Amino acid sequence: MNSTRVLLTTTSFQDTPGRHHDLMAAAGFEVVCERGPLPEARMLELAGQFDAFICGDDAITRAVIEKSLPRLKVISKYGIGLDKIDVKSATEFKIPVLFTPGVNHTTVAEHCFLLLLALEKNFLFHCDSTRSGGWKRKTGHEVMGKTIGIIGVGRIGKEVAIRARAFGMEPVGFDLYWDDKFAAEHGVRRAASLDEIFACSDYLSLHTNLTPETRDMICAASIGKMKKGVIILNCARGEIVHTDDMVAALQSGEVAGYGTDVLEHEPPSPDHPLLKLTNCIVTPHIGSRTFESVQRQASCAVENLTLFLAGQKPHAQANTF
């Protein structure tokens, strides 16, 4: 294991102190750091030089995997989203893809409420006003008594529902895999369809995976089925929302506010249209970046890698052979 050469690309792993650095040092890996997420072109330049990747949202395409062989033995994902990894090709070439479920759900759920409260209380406007020496004020809204629709009631969606109840909100969920026990315990009503959850939600929080079915799920057609003035929150993937349609809806007032931690291209270009709208808040994919969450994710990613290389079962593997 001491001769294992590892490409580490996740910036939060690198920049946050904690036990994950001790675990990495103890493993004795030769670690090469890059500042990700890396595009396919850079991954192709690096491919073939490493036994393992500890990756974030880098473009690990079929071409990258093919060029990485025969040296590459394993991919350890820092996080849970696998849409940037060609898992099908990795499986075909018998490259295990390890990941870290259950490490960031609390942090991401908290971030959703940061975005929601900032929009409903005009937080950035008031901060900008007082910092510039002014005292301008806008009237905001309470969240109590409002209905929040949660699309994707997995680990993160459940934490959002729990917090919504604490705020006195009415959570409604949509998920193909429904946890009846959780829903009964926390008073989460199940929507029978996306159209139903679109129609009833004052706030809509997205927590689904990016798939061909969910890409551009929030678009002009679906927004047309929502309440006028809905607020949409996205801590999932940027591609779930059709950007041009969202811009138009924010400009027209069909959507009162959009709070997102993710975009279709990260980082965005300086002229990205969402960055120019005062009723849109964009944070730089930091929903899971807390000291607590980073240490959990990074430690799990390193443990997955060391367990696999030692011939033991990792915490979680996305593919099977």
Image (cartoon, rainbow, N blue to C red):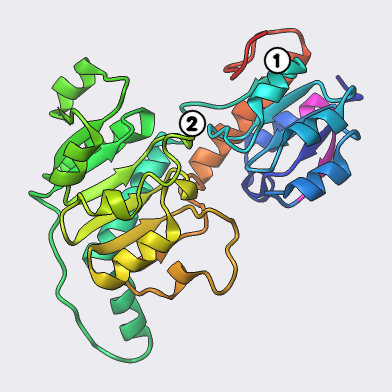
At mark 2, the secondary structure is: loop
Does residue 264 show up?
Answer: yes
Does residue 167 show up?
Answer: no
Q: Nearer the viewer, residue 300 or 203?
A: 203
Quadrant of the image occupied by residue 300: top right
Q: Is residue 101 magenta?
A: no
Badge 1 density bin: few <14, some 14–19, many ≥20, Cα 10 Å: some
Q: Residue at x 39, y 35 (%)?
A: 208
Q: Please state the extent of the stretch shown in magenta in the rendering.
A: 25-34
Q: Residue at x 48, y 34 (%)?
A: 211
Residue at far bottom of view: 133
Quadrant of the image occupied by residue 169: top left
Q: Is residue 278 above or below residue 266?
A: below
> Which residue corresponds to mark 2?
103
Residue 87 left/right relative to 175: right
Q: Residue at x 37, y 44 (%)?
A: 217
> Residue 136 appears at what percent x and percent y?
23, 87
Looking at the rendered structure, the number of numbered marks drawn on it comes to 2
- Could you tell which of marks 1 and 2 lies nearer the N-terminus? 2
> Which residue corresponds to mark 1?
307
Which residue type does callout 2 highlight?
Val
> Residue 205 appears at what percent x and percent y?
30, 45
Q: Residue at x 69, y 37 (%)?
A: 55
> Residue 79 appears at what percent x and percent y?
56, 34
